[in-house]
Amino acid sequence: MQPLLVIRSERGQMSAIERRIADFILENTHLLRDYSSQQLANALGISQSSVVKFSQKLGFKGYPDLKFSIGEAVARNGGDAQPSEDAAAGGQQALSEDLWRAKGRAEEETRLLNPPERVDAVVEMLRGADKAFVVGTGEDGVAARAFAIRLSLLGFPAIHHYDPVLVPAEVATSQPGDLLILFSERGQQSSLCQLARLFQRRGGKVVSVTRHTANPLRAHADLALLVSAHDERSHVEPLLYQAAQQQLLDLLFLLLCADESRRRRLDDYHEHVRSLQDP
C-alpha cells in the first residue's frame, strides 16, 4: 500500500501527536525530502522518538524508510495531488480532472481498507442470510435503499428501512439466520448502535458501512465495511465519500452476480423492463 494512502486511511485511528505528524506529512509531501526526523520533530514541537515510533507503527523500519517510500510514491504518481490552481480558479476541464483524480484516490484507499477476505465474508453472509434488513437515514438512506433494491432484483429477501426508530418492531421478528446492514457515514447514531445490539441478541449478524474512523457503530458490527474519503474542501468531500462507497457496493453486487441463477433472474427483469419501454 502506498505510504500516503496508509497515512490518510489510518489517520482516524491515530493519537493527537500522530495526527499532527500525519497532517504535516500530507500537507508538505514535496518538502519532506529536506527534513530529517529531528527537523520534523522540531517543526512540530515534539520528540524525535515520536517521529520514529510513528514511522514504525505504519510498518516502516524507521523515518528514513518512510521518507524514501514517500519520495518514490511522489515520483511515481506526481504527488498526492491537492486541488490544482486551475481547478481552484474554476476552469471546467481542470475542475473535472481534479475531481476525477480525487475520486480515484478515495476509491483506491477504500479498496485497500477492505481486503478481499473481508469483502468475501460479507458476500457469504448475504448468500447465507434468510433475510437482509438494510437501514440508513438521510443521505445514507439513499445508498441503503439502492443497495436493498439491487439485492431484491437478485432474489435476496431484502427489507429496506429509512427510520431506525421504527425498525425494532420488525427486528423483533428476526431469526438467527438474518442479516442487518447499517449505513451511517459517521457511525455515531445511538439508535443504530442499539439496533445492532438488539439484532445480535436475537442471533443475527450485523454489517456496518461507515467512514474509516473509530466510531461506535463500527465497533458493534460483526463485519465493518470502511469508506475513506478526505478533502479539505467541505463541498467536495461528500462527493468523494459517495463515489468510494458506491464502488464498494458495486463490487459486492458483482460478486453476488457470480451466482448464475441469480444473474439470470436479473437478466429476466431487465428484459421485462425493456419490453415495457419498447412495446
Image (spheres, rainbow, N blue to C red):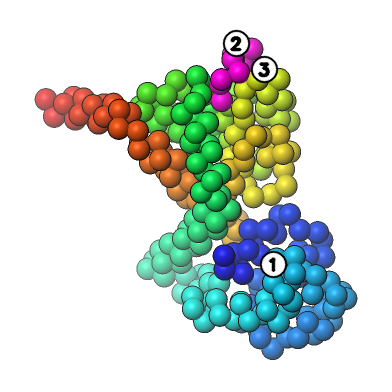
Residue farthest to the left? 279
User: Which numbered marker is on residue 173?
Assistant: 2
Label 1, on which residue? 59
262 on left or right of 113: left
221 on left or right of 105: right
The residue at 68%/58% (across/down) is 10
Label 3, on which residue? 202
Looking at the image, how many numbered discs can be counted on the residues? 3
- Nearer the N terminus, badge 3 or badge 2? 2
- Indicate the amino acid at tag 1: Gly
The residue at 59%/81% (across/down) is 71
Q: Which residues are magenta?
A: 166-179
**What distance separates the C-alpha of mark 1 from that of mark 2?**
46 Å
Regarding residue 251, the answer to whether it shows in the image is yes
The residue at 47%/23% (across/down) is 158
**What distance separates the C-alpha of mark 3 from that of mark 1?**
40 Å
Residue 53 placement (x, y as % from top left): 80, 70
- Indicate the amino acid at tag 3: Arg
- Indicate the amino acid at tag 2: Thr
Residue 17 placement (x, y as % from top left): 82, 65
- Nearer the N terminus, badge 1 or badge 2? 1
